[in-house]
Image (cartoon, grey):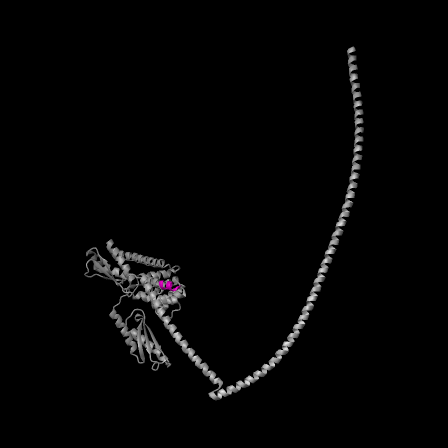
Amino acid sequence: MELLSALIAAVAGVVVGAVVGIFVGRRIEARQAELTRGTAQSEARGILEAAEREAGTLKRSAELAGKEEGFRLRDEQLRDVEDRRVELERLEKRVAEREESLEKKLDAMDQRQERVASREESLLTREKDLDISRKDLEQEKSGFQQRLETLAGMTAQDARSQLIERIEEEAKADAAQSVREIRERSRREAEREAKKIIAMSIQRMAVDHSSEITVSVVPLPSDDMTGRIIGREGRNIRSFEHATGVDVVVDDTPEAVILSSFDPIRREVARIAMQRLVSDGRIHPGRIEEVVEKASEDVKAEMHEAAELVLYELGIHGLHPQLVEVLGNLRYRTSYGQNQLQHGKEVALLAANMAAELGLDVEMTKRMGLLHDIGKGLTHTQEGSHVEIGFELCKRHDEPDQVLNAIVAHHGEEPARYPETFLVTAADAISGARPGARRESFEHYVKRLEKLEEIARSYAGVSKVYAIQAGREIRILVMPEKITDEEMAELSEKTARRIEDELQYPGQIKVVVVRETRAVNFAR
């Protein structure tokens, strides 16, 4: 019981202590709160006072700043007013100076006008004096002229005309003499320079020529092969001639057979075919046709390759394929034994050398030289001269006008319009005139020319006859008092018909009749 009482008393003591602690703590907190509130109020009053002091300071600073800004603005306005006043004074001074200068100029102009008026009066007076003097001089001149006309027996106009005529005659004579001297000197220099250029071109193109003939010889391995070529009852040789269009000559020549034809392409096809048949040994009509066809294709390919090679060597590009094909035909075309493809190449190189020396178009000259005789590649298949055929062929394939002019002008069909055309014509003549380049029976050639001139000379009224262009043209000069213009055409027609009837010649012959009237006088 005592223990329980003691325990209760302890608990009660603890409770009472706690209550007392709580009460004391709250009193302490209240006291601290009062102290804190008093401190806060004191600080707040301090802050308010500091703020009032700062506000007063700011107010005084603002008032001072406002007063300073006002003073500054007033000073700036005063300065602006002063500057404007100074500027106005300067402008007024300039205006005053200009007015003074204008017054001086006006005074000077007045003085100048007075001087001008004075000069005008002086000039008028002088002009009147000059008019009087001029009239006096004209009267004196008229009197002198009348006296001179009386003494000379002619008017002034007549004397002036005679003087002008004499001066004109003397000037014409001097001019003619100068022109004659210049022409003569130019001709000598031109001839000398032309000979030099031609000689240089010929030397640079000094090549050998080989004339081509109308027969080909095919060697045989033995005489037994001759019989196999002929075949039973000659059927093999007949088949070969039919397929190739050449004549096969089998004579006493040992171990050889001769192929004859005017067409070199046919002859070359026949030669290749015959060589292949002989080497193969199988000779019969079916085999002959097969070999001939293959040989023909090979020859065409060879001609095309030869044309391409020439174009490559000359540096010519852009040629139409058909023109290349016709150029290939020239590989086996000849004129008086001269190969025409090599002739065209040589003409191109000769003309190009001369063009380079003269500063002309070298590339175009090469093209003109190569194509000038291209018509000869088709003369065996088309009607007309090689000039006409070549012109139409190149015109159809849009070749330049220079090329067309070279084709028709190198035989004198029309005048040369370009300097390169003259070079092509000269190169053509040089190429054909080389020793060994062409061959023809001289006797036959002379007889044909003599016959041409004889036919033309047989007509009345003919004064002179010239066979030119290697017999391709005959020029007839007639007497104008015996042959009229109307009779010229009739004479040309008659001569052409007689030449056709009485002569045999390659290509065509141009007949030109010339009727010329001259007036000749001599100055002594």
Q: Toward which corner of the image does residue 435 lie, by quadrant?
A: bottom left
Determine if residue 224 is in view: yes
- Residue 490 lies, with reference to residue 9, above or below; the image says below
Determine if residue 285 is in view: no
Q: Please state the horizontal and vertical placement of residue 363, each as a whole percent of the image.
A: 39, 61
Query: Camera-side residue: 210 or 491?
Result: 210
Q: Please state the horizontal and vertical placement of residue 247, each as a whole percent of the image.
A: 25, 62
Query: Camera-side residue: 339 or 385?
Result: 339
Q: Quadrant of the N terminus?
A: top right
In this rendering, the count of numbered labels is 0
148 vs 332, left or right, is right
For image coordinates 28% across by 56% down, the residue present is: 291
Q: Please state the horizontal and vertical placement of residue 458, each as a whole percent of the image.
A: 29, 78
For image coordinates 70% across by 66% down, the residue present is: 100
- Residue 325 lies, with reference to residue 174, above or below; the image says above
Q: Main secondary structure of the magenta part?
A: helix
159 vs 91, left or right, is left
Q: Quadrant of the C terminus?
A: bottom left
153 vs 190, left or right, is right
446 vs 129, left or right, is left
Q: Toward which corner of the image does residue 313 lie, by quadrant?
A: bottom left
Q: Which residues are magenta?
A: 353-360
Q: Please state the horizontal and vertical placement of residue 76, each as a whole percent of the image.
A: 74, 52
Query: Camera-side residue: 317 or 380?
Result: 317
